[in-house]
Image (cartoon, rainbow, N blue to C red):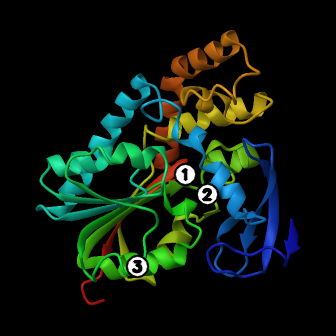
């Protein structure tokens, strides 16, 4: 492990960090993962340029079809989105205003709307935003969250499902969130667990590392510590999820044996350009292996979650009433 001063932490802007390991993205660019000495964040170094970030969120990221993934995968994802909505609805107790940051195609919010809530979303321009505009009753902002967008105490719940790690200015977002959430309101955040067994084993080949889109990571312990500074206290920490964790194991293993990372994942998004060097037989075998091995990796996720080392983690936080 080498110390570095030229790197800048995405979260706290400190220049003091330790260099941990290398990784490579789907575009062939090389990166280093650093650990900040000040806030304990793990972050991507060097910080991606605006051009690199724009390229990372090109059409291929959003999928080349009517939906991000093929129909079968989207139907499975809809099941998980509905489960999220039911979970959040349980904590909210009564209909209210829900804001989903990085709302994607808006399907989660659609389910929240069906449960009687007023739904709001923020999504950057691209294929997902275009799909979200089709959701009935959704008040959508295309772009980024800004301080003037909503009045203090507007929302009963704010959600960030695998969005936090993408933020270029996370501290700015947290300040806005802590202001526009009602006292007693809920903030739900899910993100890759850098302290997971997956992360520790696969390091630069870990699927959920996803450079250059994932800019920084916190361990669950450090995350909870930082959230208290925004008046947000933990009421639930969930490590088990069939939506993300079993596939995290599968794709990470494939990343170890394939020449390029995330080949099967890009194939599922119909990214023909990325997978053109792989035969239909190769892609078919990867897909078949992933289906046949699901029971094993579901069992492994159960084991991980018992030990609080799941590949991803979901927190339900509550805004303190006296803040």
Residue position marked by numbered label 3 in the rendering: 176
Please say if the residues under marks 1 and 3 sit with CB atoms less than 8 Å apart: no
Measure the C-alpha gap from mark 3 to mark 2: 27 Å
Who's the residue at 84% across and 76% down the image?
Answer: 6
Seen as rendered, the residue at the extreme top is 281
Where's the N terminus, which quadrant? bottom right
267 up-or-down from 63: above or below: above
Where's the C terminus, which quadrant? bottom left
224 up-or-down from 28: above or below: below
Q: Is the residue marked by circle 1 packed among few (<14), some (14-19), or many (20+) residues within 10 Å?
A: many
Relative to 59, 186 lies left or right: left
Please say if the residues under marks 3 and 2 sit with CB atoms less than 8 Å apart: no
Picture disc at residue 268: none
Please say if the residues under marks 1 and 2 sit with CB atoms less than 8 Å apart: yes
Nearer-N-terminus badge (1/2) = 2
276 up-or-down from 44: above or below: above
SS type, badge 2: loop
Who's the residue at 27% across and 51% down the image?
Answer: 109
Residue position marked by numbered label 1 in the rendering: 309
SS type, badge 1: loop
Does residue 280 appear in this view?
A: yes
Who's the residue at 64% across and 70% down the image?
Answer: 41
Measure the C-alpha gap from mark 1 to mark 3: 30 Å
Residue position marked by numbered label 2 in the rendering: 195
Query: What is the x, y in percent for residue 256?
Result: 76, 33
Q: Nearer the viewer, residue 300 or 282?
A: 282
Q: Is the residue marked by circle 2 packed among few (<14), some (14-19), or many (20+) residues within 10 Å?
A: some
Query: What is the x, y in percent for residue 10?
Result: 65, 72
């Amino acid at each position: 492990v080498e110390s570095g001063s030229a790197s800048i932490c995405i979260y706290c802007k400190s220049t003091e960090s330790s260099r941990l390991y290398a990784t490579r993205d789907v575009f062939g660019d090389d990166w280093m993962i650093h650990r900040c000495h000040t806030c304990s964040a793990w972050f991507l170094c060097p910080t991606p340029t605006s051009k690199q970030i724009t390229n990372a969120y090109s059409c291929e990221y959003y999928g080349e079809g009517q939906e991000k993934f093929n129909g079968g995968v989207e139907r499975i994802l809809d099941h998980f989105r509905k489960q999220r909505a039911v979970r959040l609805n349980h904590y909210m107790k009564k209909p209210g205003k829900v804001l989903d940051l990085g709302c994607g195609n808006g399907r989660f919010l659609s389910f929240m709307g069906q449960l009687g809530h007023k739904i709001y979303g923020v999504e950057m321009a691209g294929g997902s935003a275009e799909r979200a505009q089709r959701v009935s009753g959704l008040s959508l902002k295309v772009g980024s969250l800004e301080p003037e967008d909503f009045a203090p105490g507007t929302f009963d719940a704010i959600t960030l499902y695998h969005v936090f790690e993408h933020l270029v200015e996370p501290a700015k977002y947290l300040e806005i969130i802590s202001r526009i959430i009602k006292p007693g309101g809920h903030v739900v955040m899910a993100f890759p667990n850098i302290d997971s067994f997956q992360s520790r084993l696969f390091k630069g080949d870990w699927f959920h590392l996803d450079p250059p889109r994932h800019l920084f990571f916190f361990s669950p312990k450090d995350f909870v510590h930082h959230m208290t500074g925004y008046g947000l206290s933990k009421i639930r920490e969930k490590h088990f999820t069939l939506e993300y964790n079993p596939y995290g194991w599968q794709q990470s293993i494939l990343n170890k044996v394939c020449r390029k990372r995330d080949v099967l994942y890009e194939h599922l998004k119909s990214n023909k350009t990325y997978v053109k060097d792989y035969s239909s037989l190769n892609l078919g075998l990867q897909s078949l292996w992933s289906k046949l091995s699901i029971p094993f990796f579901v069992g492994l996720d159960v084991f991980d979650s018992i030990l609080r080392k799941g590949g991803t983690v979901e927190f339900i936080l509550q805004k303190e009433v006296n803040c």
